[in-house]
Image (cartoon, rainbow, N blue to C red):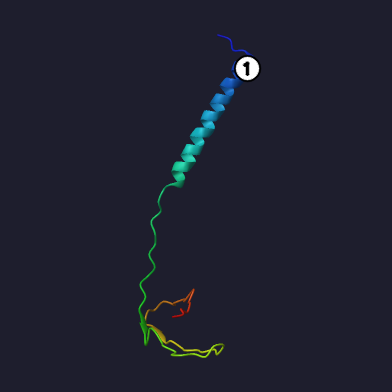
Amino acid sequence: MALNGTELDANIMMKLFLILFGLSLGIGVNAQTVTPETKPAPTSLTFKETSFDFGKIQQSRPVTHEFEIINSSPDTLKLQNVQASCG
């Protein structure tokens, strides 16, 4: 059975499509593998106080308060994204 030019091109294109489709499935399945999460080491923190009430504050008057945190863990502790709340 001889194939003409159009049938040959269609056959090659179909094989190429199937190969690329198979490769993309393999990559997609491989990307879905779950890696185990590493849990951070537990820390031992002690807060002398967890909140502070400033009472009534005049508008445009800056106020400050220092919170003391004691790290009794042998590891260094890094505080990130510390935010004050209003109200």
Name the residue at 49% across, 41% down.
27
Image quarter where the C terminus lies is: bottom left
- Residue situated furthest right in the rendering: 5
Write the residue at 46% across / 90% down: 56
Where's residue 34, x and y in %? 40, 51
Which secondary structure lies at badge 1? Answer: helix
Q: Position of residue 2 (x, y in %)?
A: 58, 10
Q: Is residue 3 left or right of residue 52?
A: right
Question: What is the count of numbered marks?
Answer: 1
What residue appears at the point 55 percent right and 90 percent down from the top-left corner?
Answer: 61
Q: Is residue 7 above or below residue 82?
A: above
Reply above or below: 67 against 27: below
Q: Is 1 rendered above or below residue 82?
A: above
Please name whichever residue, 34 or 75, is drawn nearer the observer in this view of the structure: 34
User: In the rendered image of this protein, does residue 44 appear above or below residue 8?
Assistant: below
The picture quadrant where one finds residue 67 is bottom left
Crowding near the residue tagged with mark 1, few <14, some 14–19, many ≥20 C-alpha atoms within 10 Å: few
Q: Position of residue 81 (x, y in %)?
A: 49, 74
Per the image, the residue denoted by label 1 is: 6
Query: What's the residue at 61%, 20% (across, down)?
Result: 9
Find residue 12 and report its image quarter. Answer: top right
Residue 60 or 45: which is nearer the viewer? 60
Q: Position of residue 76 (x, y in %)?
A: 44, 77
**Kind of residue at badge 1:** Thr
Indicate the quadrant containing the N terminus: top left, top right, bottom left or bottom right: top right
